[in-house]
């Protein structure tokens, strides 16, 4: 019997400041791409992967996230009065997630090819991994600017690129949550957790079998719709 999928955390609390006026009256996950809100693209991936427990976080214009997810029975971890970043946000949501490890997925991207959540689950090795991140070479990551985030060795283990040409983290991972309790800050990035895992040689990467587009800026909408071959 196949094990039950891990719970999924959808990161939906960002301010979306790079989107300019597009987020003046709506949070970034509610921006429409290819005829659907961005967060619905993420939810479709979760549905295809048969993930039963999903939690989202919210901060900016949270009522819109609540109204969109409430009818689907998806609980929302509201971050108030300050945004908690990825690490603090995940830690706050742990009682709602109720599992370890957990999947996490950013809601400001679109994907083609293999389902990223299914790729992660199929390649997770609980015996040697504390984290498994989905990556693409920087020249294959549509909408991404700058160099890559990580170097990946022949065993799949990750180290920091530190200016070298590396692979880009795509905002999808499986991660054990044990390290979250040891960080004193209320708001913090998961980068702190990844560095601990790198030091233990237990952070791994996997190259995504397909395409990906960041929708963090207005121009990303057109790029994403071209990737999806969307014709309105």
Image (cartoon, rainbow, N blue to C red):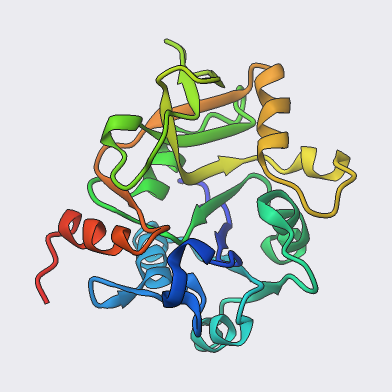
From this view, report whether residue 174 is shown above or below residue 46: above
From this view, report whether residue 230 is shown above or below residue 37: above
Apparent side of residue 117 relative to residue 58 in the rendered image (left or right): left
Of residues 33 and 70, the one nearer the viewer is 33
Residue 2 image offset from top left, x and y in percent: 46, 46
Instruction: Please state the total of marks drawn on the protein image.
Output: 0
Going 61% across and 67% down the picture, which residue do you hit?
13
Going 71% across and 18% down the picture, which residue do you hit?
200
Q: Which residue lies furthest to the left in this view?
A: 231
Q: Which residue lies furthest to the front in this view?
A: 20
Residue 70 image offset from top left, x and y in percent: 56, 86
Residue 224 image offset from top left, x and y in percent: 25, 58
Question: Quadrant of the image for the C terminus?
Answer: bottom left
Going 69% across and 27% down the picture, which residue do you hit?
195
Going 71% across and 74% down the picture, which residue do you hit?
78
Residue 75 image offset from top left, x and y in percent: 63, 76
Is residue 220 visible in the rendered image? The answer is yes
From this view, report whether residue 195 is shown above or below residue 186: above
Q: In which quarter of the image is residue 137?
A: top left
Is residue 30 visible in the rendered image? The answer is no
């Amino acid at each position: 019997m196949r094990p039950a999928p891990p719970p999924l955390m959808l990161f939906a609390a960002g301010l979306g400041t790079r989107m300019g006026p597009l987020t003046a009256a709506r949070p970034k996950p509610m921006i429409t791409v290819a005829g659907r809100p961005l967060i619905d693209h993420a939810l479709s991936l979760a549905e295809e992967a048969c993930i039963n427990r999903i939690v989202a976080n919210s901060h900016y214009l949270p009522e819109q996230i609540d109204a969109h997810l409430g009818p689907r029975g998806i609980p929302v971890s509201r971050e108030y009065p300050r945004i908690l970043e990825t690490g603090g946000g995940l830690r706050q949501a742990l009682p709602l997630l109720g599992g370890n490890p957990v999947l996490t997925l950013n809601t400001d991207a679109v994907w083609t090819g293999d389902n990223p959540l299914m790729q992660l689950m199929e390649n997770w090795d609980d015996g040697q991994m504390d984290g498994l991140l989905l990556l693409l070479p920087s020249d294959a990551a549509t909408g991404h600017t700058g160099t890559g985030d990580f170097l990946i060795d022949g065993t799949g283990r990750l180290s920091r690129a530190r200016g070298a040409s590396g692979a880009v983290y795509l905002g999808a991972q499986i991660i054990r949550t044990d390290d979250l309790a040891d960080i004193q800050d209320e708001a913090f990035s998961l980068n702190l957790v990844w560095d601990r895992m790198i030091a233990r040689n237990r952070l791994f990467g996997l190259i995504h079998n397909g395409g990906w587009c960041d929708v963090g800026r207005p121009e990303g909408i057109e790029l994403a719709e071209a990737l999806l071959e969307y014709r309105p």
